[in-house]
Image: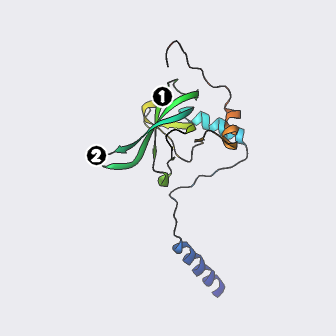
Amino acid sequence: MIRFGIFLCIICTISFAATEVHACSCAVSLKHQKQQVKKAKLDASTVFIGRVVEIVKTKDPDGNSTSAMKAVFELSRVWKGELKRTISVYTVNGDLCGFNFEKGSEYLVYAYDSSGSVDTLFTTICSRTKIAHGKYFLTDLKYLEKPLSFDAKKGN
């Protein structure tokens, strides 16, 4: 019983002494990638590859900065959603599970609507959103299948 008490004190000390706390965690499995990609596509409102052309920090009605930001993308490929040339996606500060987009970088984005409107798309680090290069990006491309086509005549 004394050993259990000592063990419990050690665990509590380690837990309370932690200097870094993460606001969220995402369960990720590297198994069954094909099913995960297909489910992510099914659940998302839109799936696309795009380059970030602008990042806007949002403000509340009083003009104060919030933890949210809007990333404006110029799209190159779309698998699901409207075929627009540009689209805005909201996220929160990276410390709060948001995705840290960088202007000029290209991403594969799985975005979700928050109010039934494509004008209020959002994403987090727990979606399959990722930088558009590397092993995991190539895995998603493999399983996303053929993207939709932009209609040059409509000027989308």
> Which residue shows up at 56% across the image and 19% down it?
150
The type of residue carrying mark 1 is: Thr
Q: Quadrant of the N terminus?
A: bottom right
Q: Which mark is residue 63?
A: 2
Confirm whether residue 96 shows in the render. yes
- Residue at 47% from the left image edge and 53% from the top image edge: 96
Residue 110, horizontal then vertical, whole percent: 56, 37
Horizontal arrangement in the rendering, residue 131 relative to residue 143 (left or right)? left
Q: Position of residue 11 (x, y in %)?
A: 59, 76
Q: Secondary structure at mark 2?
A: loop
Q: Residue at x 70, y 43 (%)?
A: 135
Most extreme residue toward the bottom is 2
Question: What residue is pinned by disc 1?
Answer: 86
Q: Secondary structure at mark 1?
A: strand
For mark 1, does the 10 Å Cα neighbourhood hold few (<14), some (14 to 19), or many (20 or more) residues?
some
Q: Is 103 left or right of 145, judged from the image as shown?
A: left
When the figure is inspected, residue 143 is found, relative to residue 32, above or below; the finding is above
Q: Amino acid at mark 2?
A: Gly
